[in-house]
Amino acid sequence: MKEEKIRMVSMAEVKAAGGPKLFSYAMKVVLQSVQLLWVLLRMELQAHVLMQNPPGLPGIAVAWLVCVLRGSNFIIDWHNYGYTIMALSHGAGHPVVRLAKWYEHFFGPLATHHLCVTNAMKDDLQRNWGIKARTLYDRPASIFRETPLQLQHQLFVRLARTHPQFQGSEEDEESSVFTVREPTGGAVSLRTKRPALLLSSTSWTEDEDFSILLKALEEYEGFVGGGAPLPDVVCVITGKGPQKEHYRKLMGALRLQHVKICTPWLEAEDYPLLLGSADVGVCLHKSSSGLDLPMKVVDMFGCCLPVCAIRFRCLQELVKHEENGLIFTDSAELAEQLKSLLSEFPRPGRLGAFRRNLQTTRGQSWDENWDQNVLPLITNQG
């Protein structure tokens, strides 16, 4: 971190103790509470404490207590509800989930100010929690933008060294399946007969069902095998998480000739470059509460990358169907959308129209959004 006015304070990981799961979890929460309280009280006095929720257990209660003791303003940035995420793996009726729900409902309203990521969440907080929040839509960082062709080529060549799905000619190590560099002059161009680059990213958790994408790719394979004039597809799924190996086994069992899938872990600087190089993005994020929006789509839109996204309650606040992307409900609908979007590839077609719409409706930058919505909130306080 190079910002002069930002100081990072690291905290050691608190590992669960042995014994019964419920006891182990309780002990971990207690230890985290003591650790966080100690760190915050030792820091210089803060005029404002801003925390993102989730995770809110035990952060909300500890931050609130510190603000009471030190006279600071406490601001919660609601990105979701923690108890709904816990319910994905434990079920809504689990004692820990019910306790977490009570915890958020009790301590959440004690904050001085509230931000949230959608108007749907703003309404829910007001109606069910008695909280008045200000909607602060996520915006992509400045690093998310369309990638120049030269940088695309360099990225593809690097990835080709470890992922054969990106490899072009075996005789030419400076080529990729998507791009080629002229031997004289070094100019880079896109291959005329290249596959479409489909990109998705995930933390491989329960709120994203990647079997939907795999089934859609199988159906797409059937379209090509049946004679449809469609390009081959290289599908790249980035990220790490608990369900990655489960889905990698499912991918390994697929018999696909016209679709290639790889699951690389990208360096932080390469991820926006790949987003800015892709032809279409796919989002399988289903909000656990139905009230938050997928940041991955925000980043894709920053790169002017059209998206196919699975439907949930408030998605239309971000993805405008038939304007900047498409919304689907199941694998069959996703397969048909990919077929439609790629039917004219590599000519721009519908993908080009969506991309142009994204280019002309980029909206505020992250800095402008912060200055307009958050800065007045904290500068008008004593």
Image (tube, rainbow, N blue to C red):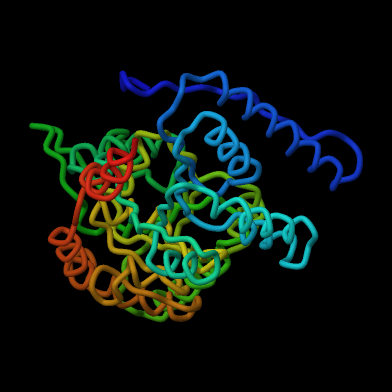
Residue 17 lies left or right of residue 296; in this view the side is right
Foreground pick, 338 / 300: 300
Q: Work out which residue is located at the far left of the displayed protein and give it.
A: 185
Q: Work out which residue is located at the far right of the displayed protein and give it.
A: 19
The quadrant where residue 20 appears? top right
- Whether residue 128 is situated above or below residue 18 in the rendered picture: below
Q: Position of residue 277 (x, y in %)?
A: 27, 49
Q: Residue at x 51, y 64 (%)?
A: 130
Q: Position of residue 5 (x, y in %)?
A: 32, 21
Q: Residue at x 27, y 58 (%)?
A: 305
Residue 313 lies left or right of residue 36; in this view the side is left
Foreground pick, 215 / 311: 311
Q: Residue at x 20, y 45 (%)?
A: 368
Q: Please identify the quadrant where the N terminus is shown.
A: top left
Q: How many marks?
A: 0
Q: Position of residue 330 (x, y in %)?
A: 50, 78
Q: Residue at x 15, y 58 (%)?
A: 359
Foreground pick, 307 / 7: 7
Q: Position of residue 57 (x, y in %)?
A: 65, 45
Q: Please identify the quadrant where the C terminus is shown.
A: top left
